[in-house]
Amino acid sequence: MKRVIALAAVVALGTALGGCMETEQTATPMKQGKYQGKPDTAPWTNAPLAYGSASWTKGDEASWEKEIKARNAPQNEYNRIGR
Amino acid sequence: MARMKFLCDAERCIECNGCVTACKQEHDIPWGVNRRRVVTINDGVPGERSISVACMHCSDAPCMAVCPVDCFYRTDDGIVLHDKDLCIGCGYCFYACPFGAPQFPQAGAFGLRGKMDKCTFCAGGPEADRSEAEFKKYGRNRLSEGKLPACAEMCSTKALLGGDGDVIADIYRERVTRRGKGSEVWGWGTAYGPGKPGAAPQGGGKS
């Protein structure tokens, strides 16, 4: 009888301690307020399209920005009709 | 560093919905989802004004703040994007957004809310650039092709400007100073700001 009680006590203790443990629920550790998704690549890390009009140096942010600003210019029609 | 922004000139918008159509076509957007739409105030009344609205890619985005799974991120050029693999479609971002930008496709027969979809500034998402997976989830990545958002580039009256914030503010400023009105919609600071295009902003101005 004593053995059964001792065994039950061990099982109960183990169960109680197990309830206190918290296992990680996500594949990657959650950091509150931090982006949890996949990393993204910047647009200038791509090579320009072979048949496109834009040309920049792959990986060079400054040259990509220059292309984007040049692409912005026609949105100002005063550039097209003259000032 | 470029900071990408949209700016819609209410004096020029003619409510043609060309921007909405361009967006739909460019990204193959499903029925019921409108990443961009045209809002008209005082419709039919003399002096009505229309404005094209989508995600404004806020510098301090409320959607990012409320997302319970932190699926939003901001790119180096200031574009607010999200990871659809993480999104649980809870809709908190929709309640937080002052522009009503987050859209939720109907995912089932009973109107079950799908993963959030919104304007990406034609910058795709966190999949390999120009890949089929990126196109299916987020639409075309025009920025990686050296292009600007389709809506702004398609705008027939050039009411909708999109691109580097400094450049489009300069375009708008020149426009307002030439026609002598229209600054009140987006603020004196954006219209007149530093005084001449390209100069550094000054403090104290109403914006």
Image: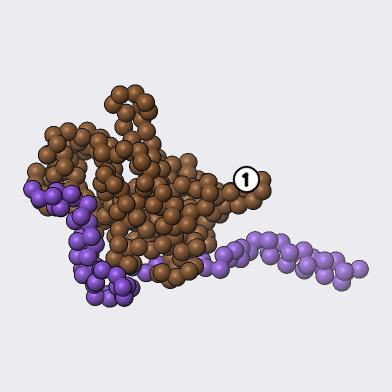
Q: Is residue B82 left or right of residue A61?
A: right
Residue at horizontal 38%, vertical 40%? Answer: B38
Q: From the viewer's perspective, is residue B183 above or below residue B201?
A: above
- The front one of A30 and B74 is B74
Query: Whole-percent x and y of residue B21?
Result: 41, 49
Determine the image quadrant of residue B205.
top left
Q: Which percent across, then down, holds residue B101?
A: 43, 45
| Chain in brown colour | B
Q: Residues within 10 Å of mark 1 (few under 14, many from 20)?
A: few
- The vertical placement of A29 against B22, above or below, is below
Q: Which residue is mark 1?
A: B111
Viewport quadrant of the N terminus of chain B: bottom left
Quick one: SS at disc 1?
loop
Which residue is depicted at the point 44% across and 52% down? B24
In percent of width and height, residue B11 lies at: 25, 36
Q: Residue furthest right?
A: A1
Chain letter, disc 1 residue: B
Q: Residue at x 78, y 67 (%)?
A: A11
Three-letter code for the amino acid on which mark 1 is drawn: Gly
Task: Describe the colour scheme in one phrase.
Answer: by chain
Chain ID for purple: A
Q: Is residue B122 visible?
A: yes
Image coordinates for residue B180, horizontal then vertical, percent: 13, 34
Which is more toward the observer, A14 or A5? Answer: A14
